Image (cartoon, helix red, strand yellow):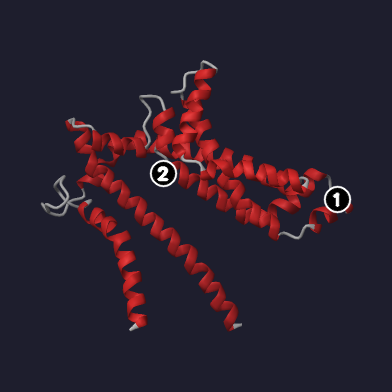
Amino acid sequence: MKKFLSFLYIALILAFIYIPIIILVVYSFNKGKTIGIWEGFSLKWYEKLTDIKNVLFNTITLAVVSSLIATVLGTLGAIGIFYNKKKTGKFIKGLSQIPIVNSEVVTACALVLLFIIFRLPHRHIVWLYIGHIILTTPFVVLSVMPKLKQMDGSLYEAALDLGATPTQALFKVVLPEIMPGVFSGFMLAITLSLDDYIVTATLSPLDFDTVSTAVYKAIALTTETASQRVPTYRALTTIIFLLTVAIVVIINVKPNKRRKANENR
């Protein structure tokens, strides 16, 4: 009975999470625009994805560029924190975690006030990139720090003793050891950037849309053009969901195959 209740509890949680997504996926193949009224199978909303190619380009470019910069800054910051004096490192680490705890609204408002103080136009593409970098860099630091702690601390000193310069020791010894954390930080940064709405809506130019802002406008506006695009975003969401599932399956299947191969040897 206890095992059945545990299974039922997990099933209810999974159903609560995934049933809305499954409904969205099913109705992305609906000929009609309205969820709840099935008008026949159709791929026309997938064909209309070309109508939002500019939105997709803006979203991907913003996410990739800001995440690459955030990964570099976050990795260097984590290394600096790790190799700094203990008290100083703890203090800087605490400061770096404040943006993680803070609400995005606070970050967005603070950036707008900063730009107003310096009389800068806050709705500018440069400030949007800066906002995303500020938003994602602390998460890269958080991802890299555990790998630095797991690394053998004597490797860096050994490289220096063997004649390597600090730069050579960093690139040839430290970075290869922490690369899984750097990659995880990059993936986390790009996910946060793709998903962000508040900072993007606050700082982006009025003629610049990402998927998050475009979806909101399509739902909030009552114009015919906006309403026509709602089912198109269902198709886009379905593609994103299926790609995510595929990535998760690949990531989990490969280690299992390696483990079974090692067990059979």
23 shown above or below 32:
below
> What residue is shown at x 66% (from left), y 57% (from top)?
147
Q: Choose the circle earlier in sequence order: 2 or 1.
A: 1
Please, what secondary structure does the residue beneath circle 1 have? helix
Tell me the residue that label 1 is attached to. Answer: 160
185 shown above or below 258:
above
97 shown above or below 17:
above
> What residue is shown at x 36% (from left), y 33% (from top)?
54
Between 241 and 41, the residue placed more toward the observer is: 241
The nearer-to-camera label among 2 and 1 is 2
Furthest residue to the top?
Answer: 119
Amino acid at dot 1: Leu
User: What separation in Å lies between label 2 and label 1 (alpha carbons)?
Assistant: 42 Å
Quarter of the figure with residue 178: bottom right
> What residue is shown at x 46% (from left), y 22% (from top)?
122
For residue 61, side relative to residue 16 (left or right): right
State the image coordinates of residue 232 (x, y, percent, origin top left): 25, 43
Between 251 and 94, the residue placed more toward the observer is: 94
Amino acid at dot 2: Asp
Q: Quadrant of the N terminus?
A: bottom left
Between 148 and 4, the residue placed more toward the observer is: 4
> What residue is shown at x 28% (from left), y 34% (from top)?
217
Whether residue 130 is visible to the viewer of this picture, yes or no, is yes
State the image coordinates of residue 196 (x, y, percent, origin top left): 42, 40
For residue 50, side relative to residue 109 (left or right): left
Q: Quadrant of the C terminus?
A: bottom right
Tell me the residue that label 2 is attached to. Answer: 195
